[in-house]
Image: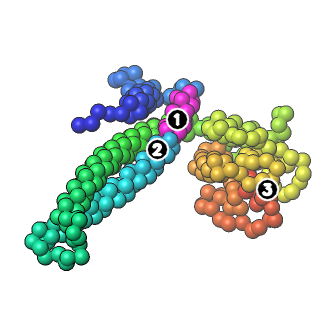
Amino acid sequence: MTAPSPMFRRHAALAVSVISALTFALGTAAPGNADPQPDESRLRAELTTLNKKVDKLIEVYAARRESLKKAQAAEGAARADLRKAEEAYAGAERQLGSIAQLYYQSSAGELPSLLFSADMSGVAIMEQLAAEQSTSLRDFARSRDLREQAAEKAAQLTREIGEETKAVEVQREEAEKVIAEIEKKLDALVPTGSGRRADGSWAPQLPTGPDNITDRTLIMREAVKKRFDLPYEVGCYRAENDGGEHPLGRACDFMMSTGGSMPSAANVKLGDEIAAWAVENRAGLGVKYVIWRQRINSGSGWSAMSDRGGTTANHFDHVHISMF
């Protein structure tokens, strides 16, 4: 069995640290010591740590993938050189066979007299050619053997890097499973919006405080800020009366880009996550509807909206959450 490469051993050490973090994150509750309400700050610290580890694993995975491509290319080149060496060797063998046949024919006196002259023996020529070709054949054989060794080494390196790449991917998947578990625990701690009546409806609220938003909107905004690492400022109240909830202090825009530009792929993904989270927690928080990327969701699925004429107007650069 081939010994693991130094790079593989380093990745194995990284795997041990990740698995240790995963075990710590999930915890093992002893009988009688189970914590029914996980500490939110502890969960968030664990989530931050694990996300950093996942980012590192993604970097390692990307590097391994790049190394794998190079190794595969090197293996392909080595195999191509081996094929050329084998073809050259086969050609040399055929040529030596032809010389041997000529030698036999000349010895038997069957070659045309054109091959022989008074001052040169045809047999001597054949012997010289055969000797030269035998030397060439040995050189071809050595070249072929060296190329075969190179191809095998390249294949072994490709296999090792491929195994390392798979191992890192498994580690990342395991870490992301634990992250999902922690996020479930955090979602269980999402606060309930204020002003909820016994029948499940929501009592009207007036905007208050320095932000001029309702208490229910404030609870939602802070919950989103805790749950997600937001890239830009959050805009809630605005005096402009456009018929929506902003001037009533009942809506917030979570920006995914600035200046009316389209968000990056990473921020589009983040916007998707925020929108999905708001819909999932709408009943507890008191969310009226969510708008994101020219679609609206009031709790019964996403529906397309008409074109309002711009990136911001169509909510491509921010997630809009309106509250009851």
Q: Earlier in the sequence, mark 2 or mark 3?
A: 2
Circle 2: is it few (<14), some (14-19), or many (20+) Cα within 10 Å? some
Q: Is residue 58 magenta?
A: yes
Q: Nearer the viewer, residue 163 or 192?
A: 163
Q: Which mark is residue 67?
A: 2
Residue at image coords 60%, 61%? 301
Residue 144 percent coordinates (x, y): 29, 52
Mark 2, secondary structure of its residue: helix
Give the answer, above or below, for where 289 lies relative to 100. above
Q: Which residues are magenta?
A: 44-61
Q: Decide: marks 3, 1 in contact (CB < 8 A)? A: no
Quadrant of residue 190 in the image?
Answer: top right
Circle 1: is it few (<14), some (14-19), or many (20+) Cα within 10 Å? some
* Residue type at numbered disc 2: Ser
Residue at image coords 68%, 66%? 304
The residue mark sitting in front, 2 or 3, is 2
Which residue is tagged 1? 56
Q: Can I make out residue 136 in this image?
A: yes
Chief secondary structure of the magenta span?
helix
Q: Can I make out residue 271 in this image?
A: no
Q: Nearer the viewer, residue 92 or 288?
A: 92
